[in-house]
Amino acid sequence: MKILVISDYFYEFSINKSMDFIKHIKLNQYEPLPLRGYDAIIIDMTFYNKELGLDETKLLYDLKIKFSEDKNILSKNNSILIVVSGAQSKDLKYEEKYDPENTKSPYEPKDFNSYDFLKELVPDKGSLKLDEKGNDSYPDTAKPVSLYLERYKSEPYFLFYDYNPDSVASAGVTPLSRVRENASPCVAFENNSGRGLVVILPPYDINDRETAYLLLLKTCRSYFKQREGFKGYIKFDDAIPEPIRNDFIEAVACFNYDLYRASLVMCRRALEGSVIDKGGDGKNLMEQIEYLHKPLHLISNDVKELAQTVRVIGNKLGAHSNSEDIQVTEEDMITAIECLSRFFDNVYILPKQSEKALKRRQELEGK
């Protein structure tokens, strides 16, 4: 994936790490923003209390122009936009350089709000409602922003959004955290915009910049993996028994966070649970899988090989410690999750679909 990062504070960490998939722009290097061609864009507005300088003001104004010119830019590109909103929202004045040859646009200061560029991406304001227990919508472990929010959700300078679950305008918004206990404005939320995604996050601790930078990159990669990684065919179908399904969900969540060994352990756990659930017998998982193939004949030889692949990858790279520090690659993880998903298709999802189809066919045939 390709990520564009606009930030002064993150520049030193970007140049010190060999990340070819990242393009970094400092505010004083900023030119009209090349938004197209990136899978994710991180805009760092960690300005805090200081007066915004010309670079920051130019950035905000150009973003306003860019998004007003092409309101569907995120949807067209299927992009992920993450805005770290470290400045309080207030009106600014931007003065374009006087051009005596441009008679169509006379020189005059332009007033705008510092977050005007989000107006086309964020619905109208409402008010936040808590659930029956008085809790707000904090993220669960599957949400890629949760690690970031656990560190930075209580910082005082933010762009907030008043969320109303009963409002049509808020239909595409998922609140992620509030500024403080018993307060209604959200300080972080997701907004689905067509095929794109906008994530507004509170600011980070200026003394913890590298951690914040890595967490934001992880958030981008996590959303990208969810959208592109398995091409939409990973199914958490109700046909899979709940304990096994939860293990599989956790395995994919760990993968999205780049926690590959943890993901492999959960893949192996989900596989073992399903093999036992289907009657696999033997002194170890290998024999139990073979038992499903013969003598039970519940799985074909191809499906058996899928399960054995998950077992071997899980054992060698995840579950069992060894003296060799074998690196778990993303390709290993994709193979394990794809094989496990196909295994579940064959032992749970397809049989349930066949049973449903047979029942309907018999009804139509009058039996």
Image: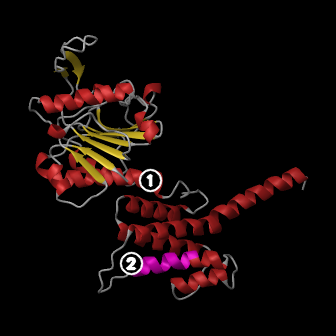
User: Where residue 66 sits: x, y (%)?
Assistant: 33, 29
Residue beneath disc 2: 317
* Quarter of the figure with the N terminus: bottom left
Task: Relative to 70, say whether 19 is above or below.
Answer: below
Residue beneath disc 1: 226
Question: Main SS type for the magenta part?
Answer: helix
Q: Nearer the viewer, residue 3 or 173?
A: 3
Q: How is the image coloured?
A: secondary structure
Cα–Cα span, label 1 and label 2: 23 Å
Tell me, yes or no, if residue 133 can be seen here: no
Residue at image point 46% right, 37% down: 76
Q: Nearer the viewer, residue 86 or 71?
A: 71
Residue at image point 69% right, 64% down: 351
Task: Relative to 257, say whether 108 is above or below.
Answer: above
Residue at image point 61% right, 78% down: 304
Which SS class for mark 1? helix
- In the rendered image, the residue lying farthest to the right is 366
Tell me, for residue 96, which label it has, or none.
Answer: none
Q: Give the side of residue 166 with respect to residue 109, left or right.
A: right
- Looking at the rendering, the stretch of residues picked out in magenta corresponds to 306-316
Q: Nearer the viewer, residue 170 or 127?
A: 170
Residue 310 on the magenta segment: yes
Residue at image point 17% right, 59% down: 16
Q: Give the side of residue 113 with respect to residue 355, left or right.
A: left
Task: Relative to 95, say whether 294 is above or below.
Answer: below
* Quarter of the figure with the C terminus: bottom right
